Every structure is written in structure tokens, then in C-alpha cells.
Image: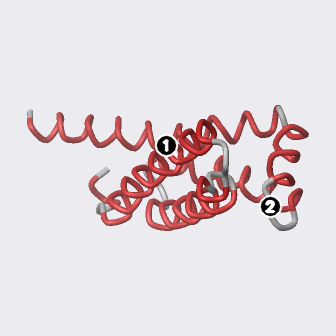
Amino acid sequence: MSDNFDRYVYLTGRTIIGLYFLVPGIFKILSFSDYIQIVSINGVPFPVFSLILVILCQLIFGSSIILGRFLKIGSIVLGTNILLFNFYIHDFWNMNDVINQNHEMQNFIKNTAILAGLLVLYKTDESSS
């Protein structure tokens, strides 16, 4: 029973992490012009190309993590995305407004925790899924 429980916990965790990327990837497609404004305002280089690349990474590797495939590369690619999000989008250190600064700091910390989950997933043996 412990092995089955472990599998369900592992599958649930993978699914939640995968959905964390897959769902926003879909929303970025549906609101593409809004997201172009966000990345442009935040100084992301090559905004259209960068956004398309992020969407593809979120859709492909979010799905692959849910399915338990390509966990190592997916974890690295999505982890890199998080680092870039934190640097460009959640740059609380560049804000003067305390409310927005606190909000972005919270997003930065949350993303850092998700990065930790991806690093743990990277270390997980793919054959155990």
C-alpha cells in the first residue's frame, strides 16, 4: 500500500507543478496582447519572441511534467523561466510603491519555492513514475 500511496503523492505533486505552468501558458495565448504589454513594460528583450518561447516552454514542459516525461530537461527549462520571470517581472527591488513592492516580493518568493520543487523533481528518478 505504501508504494501505491507514494505513486499517488508523486503523481499529484507532478500534476500540480505541471499545471502551474500549463494553465498560465494557455492564458498567455488567450490574452497575448495583454502579455506583450507586460513583457514590454518590464523590459524583456525581444518581447514577442520571448513571450512565444515562454508559452511554448510552459505548454510543452508543463505537459511533459504532468505525463512524467523529460522531467530533467523540463525542470531545467521551467526553472530557467522562473529565474527570468523573477528577474524581469517580479523585480521588487526596482519598485518604490510599497504595496506593489510587497506583492512582487511575494511572487518572487513563491516562484523561488516552485523553483525548489523543480530542482527536487529534477533529482527524482524518471523510472519511478
State the residue position of label 2: 50
Across and down, in percent, residue 95 comes to 66, 52
* Residue 85, quarter of picture: bottom right
Please name the residue shown 76% across and 39% down the image: 28
Q: Disc 2 marks which amino acid?
A: Ser
Give whichever of 73, 34 is nearer the camera.
Answer: 34
Q: Earlier in the sequence, mark 1 or mark 2?
A: 2
Please name the residue shown 29% across and 43% down the image: 10
Q: Disc 1 marks which amino acid?
A: Gln
Give whichever of 65, 84 is nearer the camera.
Answer: 84
Q: Which mark is residue 71?
A: none
Across and down, in percent, residue 83 comes to 56, 63
* Residue 44, quarter of picture: bottom right
The residue carrying pointer 2 sits among few (fewer than 14), some (14 to 19) or many (20 or more) residues within 10 Å by Cα, namely some
Q: CA distance from mark 1 to mark 2?
A: 24 Å
- 113 lies above or below 87: above
The residue carrying pointer 1 sits among few (fewer than 14), some (14 to 19) or many (20 or more) residues within 10 Å by Cα, namely some
Give whichever of 128, 53 is nearer the camera.
Answer: 53
Please name the residue shown 53% across and 44% down the image: 107
- 57 lies above or below 17: below
Classify residue 84 as left or right of residue 68: right
Which element type, helix, strand or loop, lies under badge 2? helix
State the residue position of label 1: 106
Which element type, helix, strand or loop, lies under badge 1? helix
Across and down, in percent, residue 114 comes to 43, 50
Classify residue 16 as left or right of residue 63: left
Please name the residue shown 59% across and 45% down the image: 101
Q: Are marks 1 and 2 in contact (CB under 8 Å)?
A: no
Classify residue 115 as left or right of residue 24: left
Give whichever of 16, 65 is nearer the camera.
Answer: 16
